[in-house]
Amino acid sequence: MSKKLLLLFFLMFTFPFSAQAHTTLLSSTPTEGQNVTEVLTEVELVFGTKIEEGSTVSIEGEAGSYEFDDIAIKNNVMTGKFSETLPNGSYRILWNIIGEDGHPIEGNIVFSMLNEVKEKEKAETVPAVDEKMVISEKKSVELQKEKNSNLSVTILLVLAAVLIVYGIYKLMLKKK
């Protein structure tokens, strides 16, 4: 009996739970909430695991969207390069990746451009980050927390299923 229990315990942990984990954004250039004062020609996003081809990134601003001239993906780093100069204002980097596990994940990074600030503009108030962008970022964080919560629920359900199967197995042994 203890051999069967040991085998069941071993099988329970041999299933690949790593397929349930999703990658996360580790760092970015520019960073969340950063006020960029120099000309921005490149955006770099670093993720927790390798990302697959087909992942995308774009920039959305107050005056419209800006597309990258070149997007390069190497292991866990996605780099977008563009030649267009972004005017002063609030922007969002919109990213959508396909993680190593095949699941699509999306998010955004809010930042501001304060390029070529003149002396009298320095005395004025720096433009605030758009409220819609901040709310969208909060929703993104809440969504990530929900995904992490869903992972915990999945693990608990798997453990409950194993215990139920074990209980049925025990009942069947008693009937014999």
Image: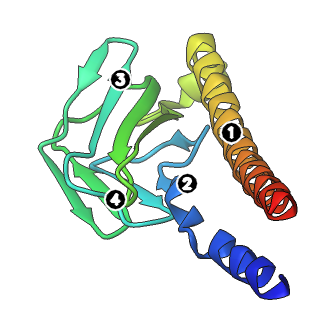
Labelled pair 1, 3 in contact (Cβ < 8 Å): no
Which label number is shown at residue 150? 1
Left or right relative to 168: residue 43: left
Left or right relative to 34: residue 7: right
**Residue that numbered label 2 is attached to:** 20
Mark 1 or 2, nearer chain start: 2
Labelled pair 1, 2 in contact (Cβ < 8 Å): no
* Inter-mark Cα distance, 2 to 3: 31 Å
**Residue that numbered label 3 is attached to:** 60
**Amino acid carrying mark 3 in the image:** Glu
Q: Residue at x 42, y 36 (%)?
A: 115
Residue 144 place in picture, x, y as percent: 64, 38
* Inter-mark Cα distance, 1 to 4: 22 Å
Residue 95 place in picture, x, y as percent: 38, 38
**Residue that numbered label 4 is attached to:** 51
* Inter-mark Cα distance, 2 to 4: 16 Å
